[in-house]
Amino acid sequence: MKKFLLPLLFLFLFIFESIVIQFWPADSFESRILAPRFLFAALAFLTIYVGKKQGIIYAAIFGLLFDVVYVEVIGIYLFLYPLICYLITKLMQVIHNNIIVAFLVSMFGIALLEVGVYELNYLIHVTSMAFIDFVNLRLYPTLILNAIFLVVAAYPFKRWFEKHAEVLKEE
């Protein structure tokens, strides 16, 4: 049963992201665009506290799921989720691991994800928004929303993934 808890957590976060957007008051932030990246924040913590292999596998699976369900162009999240998780593992080899660093690295990963999605969409002409408009209207509000989420969820994620890593070592 415990083997299914981790995929269920990610599936819950996948669904929770869309629920947050659906029930968020549309006029509360004027023309700002909020993109919850709760699933990716959890993937970043999984990568930091469990390891590269699990992080990249889950990132590829849920990146493909995200592409299939939400995105017109299949492959953007399938490419970016594992790539950023890989970069996070390389970054964590250099930086000392604690919860504040994990928070900052996760926020950095979310920023990379947002910029990467914007750039790929700009490259294939899905969006024509200027980069400075993207930063002001989407990147900053997205980072603030996800920082609030991570302030609440960082410690539970850390505890859960550390326990999961110990279970994997015992097997």
Image: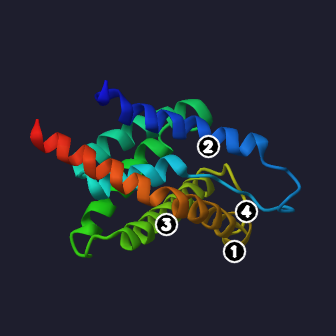
Image quarter where the N terminus lies is top left
- Earlier along the polypeptide chain: callout 4 or callout 3? 3
Q: Secondary structure at mark 4?
A: loop
Q: Mark 1 packing: few (<14 Cα in 10 Å), some, or many (20+)? A: few
| Residue 128 picture location, percent across and down | 72, 58
Residue 17 disc label = 2
Front residue (pair 167, 79): 167
- Earlier along the polypeptide chain: callout 2 or callout 3? 2
Q: CA distance from mark 1 to mark 2?
A: 25 Å
Answer yes or no: is residue 75 visible.
yes
Identify residue type, mark 4.
Met
Image-based side of 11 in relation to 30, left or right: left
Front residue (pair 109, 161): 161
Q: CA distance from mark 2 to mark 3?
A: 16 Å
| Residue 139 picture location, percent across and down | 64, 66
Identify residue type, mark 3.
Met
- In front: mark 1 or mark 2? 2
Image quarter where the C terminus lies is top left
Identify the residue under disc 4.
129
| Residue 99 picture location, percent across and down | 37, 68
